[in-house]
Image (spheres, grey):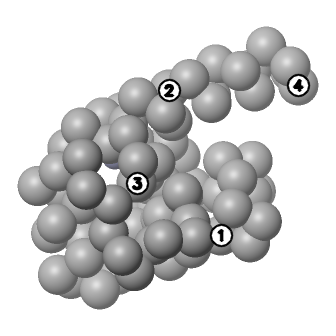
Amino acid sequence: MERHTRFEHHRWVGDKRDQVVHDIDACTDEQRIAELMAAGTYLCFCPDTLAEARNRSYRPCRHCEGAKEAAAAEAGNEI
Ligand SMILES: [Zn+2]
């Protein structure tokens, strides 16, 4: 998948409307990402991690393979 140049340096991109965070490299819902880019309601996290997104009450996208893996890894490591 082509990476959005806007997010060259970011992996995790949140949608402010539904507070879902996407793994921009691994999201299989490309339409949703395209729609999000068009709507302009996205934000990046600093640091660029799923943990930081979760701290801000974002939940991982169900269509992102990376988000699923990261969530599983976090569950295994931290909880
Ligand atoms: Zn996604």
Instruction: Kindly identify which residue carries mark 3.
Output: 24
Mark 3: C-beta under 8 Å from nearest atom of ligand 1: no
Instruction: Kindly identify which residue carries mark 1.
Output: 45
Q: CA distance from mark 4 to mark 2?
A: 15 Å
Residue type, label 3? Ile
Sequence-earlier tag: 1 or 2: 1
Sequence-earlier tag: 1 or 3: 3
Q: CA distance from mark 1 to mark 3?
A: 12 Å
SS for callout 4: helix
Residue type, label 1? Phe
SS for callout 1: loop
Q: CA distance from mark 4 to mark 1?
A: 20 Å
SS for callout 2: helix
Q: Residue at x 40, y 80 (%)?
A: 6
Sequence-earlier tag: 4 or 1: 1
Q: CA distance from mark 2 to mark 3?
A: 13 Å
Instruction: Kindly identify which residue carries mark 4.
Output: 78
